[in-house]
Amino acid sequence: MSSKPKLDSPEQIFKKTASGIRGLDEITFGGLPKGRPTLITGGAGSGKTLMSMEFLVRGATNHGEPGVFMAFEETAEELAQNVASLGFDLKELIAEKKILVDYVRVERSEIEETGEYDLEGLFVRLNHSIDTIGAKRVVLDTIESLFAGLGNEAILRAELRRLFRWLKDKGVTAIITAERGESTLTRYGLEEYVSDCVILLDHRVQNQISTRRIRVVKYRGSVHGTNEYPFLIDEKGISILPITSLTLNYQISTKRISSGIARLDAMLEGKGFYNGSTILISGTAGTGKTSIAASFAKSTCQSGEKCLYFAFEESPNQIIRNMKSIGIDLEPNIQKGLLKFHAVRSTFYGLETHLVQMQKLIDEYNPASVIVDPITNLINAGDQNEVKSMLTRLIDYLKAKQITALFTNLTHLAGLESTESEVSSIMDTWILLRDIELGGERNRGIYILKSRGMAHSNQIREFLITSKGVDIVDVYTGSAGVLTGSARLSQEIKDKETEDSRKEEIKKLQRDLERKRKLMDAQVAALQAEFIAAEEEVKQLIKQEKRREKTVDENRQDMAHIRKADKE
Amino acid sequence: MRQIEKITKQNAEESEIWELRLYVAGQTPNSMKALANLRKIAEEHLKGKYTIEVVDLLKNPQLAAGDQILAIPTLVRKLPEPLRKIIGDLSNTERVLVGLDIRPK
């Protein structure tokens, strides 16, 4: 009991070998079990051989671990050709003794069986190959071919059991590939022998669109992502998209980024979008969604940042030409490497494959902003149920990387304020473009339906596409209602005329008044003169009266004097 | 005509040397049994016109790939052409004779 293994640190119990395959190490939390065999099973064409080959190539080139590829189905020459499409130079690696390919040919018609035998020859070969280049990684692809080549299944099973045991003892990290059975994981029940880690590859076709998926069925002694993850095989190898592991704990920025349209920035508190936010531009056909997207792309490039433009409807050249006609020249930015287009028809892949591809491109290009034009096509590429979850995963991924994302969305008149998959709820800013039909013409209106975290304008503005770019002007909101376009212009002229004539009217009234005032002044003067005359008269009368009284008084005294009257 | 042609062909074959190679991995019971059986069969049916080479893969592992050896023991008929393989301890003489094309199937 003294040799009981220490259980203190998990590393001591369980070591993992980083596979080096993009995404696989994330979903297995570190890689494949070190020094143990892993079973990769899947149907024909599911990518087993490529995945196991990439495991060896990554090990040899990035982790300094040489590898042996024991091929039961393809020769070294064929393998080299097949993986050249993934950008692997197998011949070079073989020449450098980093990888050794041993082609094992089992042809039943050439072999006669008589009596007891074992597969020591296979062991000897494998052992010799491993020792020759000091391999740490081994791939057996597809060992099940032995079942077709050798008749005695009892011996074969016993020997396979011994082989996997032997691989463990040898301490190499091995991948054994197997064909998927009808109702079992593998056709010959290999999972019975290789039970530490089982990975299932799947290649499904839904609505004529294929999607590759990977699932870690079992990983003894380790936690692992249990979901099905889509993956991609392209010129740079395999990429798995494990973004379901993301949470809502991403960093939030208060920095702002201009939309490229001054008035739109003004509507957004005068500062534009938040850095790392998601913006949805929805509108009916021909409302100028792409123009806004292109303005934003140009603005990003002008601030010296990189922008990645996913075009699902138009070819890059067409977008460039069309945008040039409205004064948005994107070409210099492409030449400077600041703008990159990725154009692909949405029906080309399934939604998941699109998203893996987008994630991969974003990873490689590392842009500050991403434009998806339009997202509608992407939505149509997938099953309605998965659309929202997949988009959420993409948006979470973008947010985690602090990438500002602008999505355009084509809506139909009926459901202008609802997006097909309800993607609007996961968007931070939602700008609506709409047609305003009035007076026999069609004009574009723009308003901000929502913009999280800012006091945005609630006004409907008119959105103009001119040869000098896009512009936003106030709509006419006066006595005649909300008017746009030429109706707005004519109403504005009409208003001016009305105003002018009103001004005339006032001037006339003022002149009248002035005249009246003068008349009044004259009358006042006349009255005053009359009054003065009357006053003068009265004064004269008073004077005369006083004089008369005095005379009367004098006369009386004279009389008294004459009468020698008594003194009083 | 046909009869004669067949005889001449047989004569030609009989004049050839049978080059036989037995792959083993150490002195395992199966290998020892196979070698003994092979010697016996060869003495009986190919007397005087055969060579037997025993290759021990434990000593020369690099030789396994050349003849596509998986099973041990494996008997390879190098000559006459075409190359033929018989795996196992060669305990079933009939099948060995058929396998080596000494006796028609």
Image (cartoon, coloured by chain):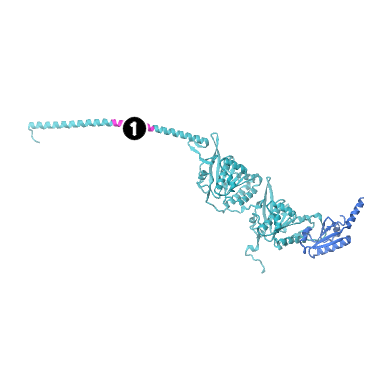
Chain colours: A cyan, B blue
In the image, A100: left or right of A241?
A: right
Q: Residue furthest bottom?
A: A2
Subunit of mark 1?
A
Q: Which residue is mark 1?
A: A517
Q: Position of residue A179 (x, y in %)?
A: 73, 53
Is residue A32 visible in this depiction of the protein?
yes
Q: Is residue A460 magenta?
A: no
Q: Residue A119 placed where, x, y %?
A: 77, 60
Determine which quarter of the picture holds residue A35: bottom right
Q: Is residue A400 left or right of residue A182?
A: left
Front in this rendered view, residue A529 or A339: A339
Which residue is outermost to the left?
A564
Q: Is residue A145 above or below residue A516?
A: below
Circle 1 residues within 10 Å: few <14, some 14–19, many ≥20: few
Numbered label tally? 1
The quarter of the displayed image where residue A32 is located: bottom right
Relative to the observer, which residue lies in front, A555 or A148?
A148
Please name the residue shown 11% across and 31% down the image: A556
- The segment highlighted magenta reads A509-526
Residue drawn at (74%, 61%) of the image: A128
Q: Magenta stretch: residue A515 in it?
A: yes
Amino acid at dot 1: Arg
Spot occupied by residue A160 in the image (x, y as percentages of width and height): 75, 59
Percent from the top left, x then y, of residue A299?
A: 55, 46
Q: Quadrant of the C terminus of chain A?
A: top left
Q: Secondary structure at mark 1?
A: helix
Image position of A62 with respect to A282: above or below = below
